């Protein structure tokens, strides 16, 4: 029996994407002065493919064992190899990173708002519409 609809699962995956993007942007900003550091980005297409194909079933010898799923560690993160903005070989553009940070924050806020709406609907159903 599924407690939540597919919408909650989809929002969860979108939040995972947003969290990974936040992590990559933070790493880029932290390494803005690191020589030869190449800026990284998150490929939405690869993230989506990974999310759709990463369902790994655990081998359970007893029905009481918990099942789990696992995914490989962020193959959706791509590095921009041939880009260079600074004299030291660094390819981090701080203005672009700050813009990406702001848009990712707006995306995250929209997702959490949608998730709150889904839980409000579920709460209303549990309370019998009261």
Image (tube, helix red, strand yellow):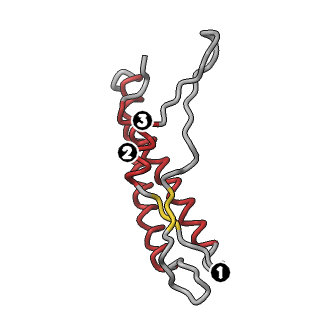
Residue at 40%, 49% in the rendered image? 111
The residue that disc 3 covers is 9
Q: Residue furthest front?
A: 82
- Of badges 2 and 1, nearer the viewer stands 1
Measured in 3D between alpha carbons, the distance from the residue under mark 3 to the one under mark 1, in whole angstroms, is 40 Å
- Front position in the image: 121 or 55: 55
- Of badges 3 and 1, nearer the viewer stands 1
Judged from the image, the secondary structure of the residue bearing numbered disc 2 is helix
Measured in 3D between alpha carbons, the distance from the residue under mark 2 to the one under mark 1, in whole angstroms, is 41 Å
Q: Residues within 10 Å of mark 3 (few under 14, many from 20)?
A: few
Where residue 47 sits in the image (x, y, percent)?
44, 49
Q: Residues within 10 Å of mark 2 (few under 14, many from 20)?
A: some
**Left or right of residue 89, residue 53 in this image:** left
The residue that disc 2 covers is 114
Residue at 58%, 66% in the rendered image? 26
Q: Earlier in the sequence, mark 3 or mark 2?
A: 3
Quarter of the figure that contains the C terminus:
top left
Judged from the image, the secondary structure of the residue bearing numbered disc 1 is loop
Which of the 4 image quadrants contains residue 123? top left
The residue that disc 1 covers is 35
Q: Is residue 112 visible?
A: no
Q: Earlier in the sequence, mark 3 or mark 1?
A: 3
Q: Is label 3 in contact with label 2 (beta carbons under 8 Å)?
A: no
Judged from the image, the secondary structure of the residue bearing numbered disc 3 is helix
Measured in 3D between alpha carbons, the distance from the residue under mark 3 to the one under mark 2, in whole angstroms, is 12 Å
Q: Earlier in the sequence, mark 2 or mark 1?
A: 1
Where residue 56 sits in the image (x, y, percent)?
52, 29
Residue at 56%, 43% in the rendered image? 72
Residue at 53%, 78% in the rendered image? 91
Can you say whether 47 is above or below 26 in the image? Answer: above
Quarter of the figure that contains the N terminus:
top left
Q: Residues within 10 Å of mark 1 (few under 14, many from 20)?
A: few
């Amino acid at each position: 029996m599924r407690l939540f609809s597919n919408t909650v699962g989809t929002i969860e995956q979108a939040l995972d994407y947003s969290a990974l993007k936040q992590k990559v942007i933070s790493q880029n900003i932290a390494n803005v002065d690191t020589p030869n550091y190449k800026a990284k980005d998150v490929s939405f297409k690869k993230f989506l493919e990974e999310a759709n194909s990463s369902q790994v079933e655990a081998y359970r010898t007893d029905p009481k064992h918990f099942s789990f799923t696992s995914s490989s560690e962020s193959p959706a993160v791509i590095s921009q190899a041939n880009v260079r903005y600074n004299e030291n070989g660094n390819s981090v553009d701080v203005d672009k990173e700050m813009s990406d940070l702001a848009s990712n924050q707006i995306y995250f806020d929209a997702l959490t708002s949608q998730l709150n709406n889904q839980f409000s609907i579920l709460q209303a159903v549990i309370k019998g519409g009261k």
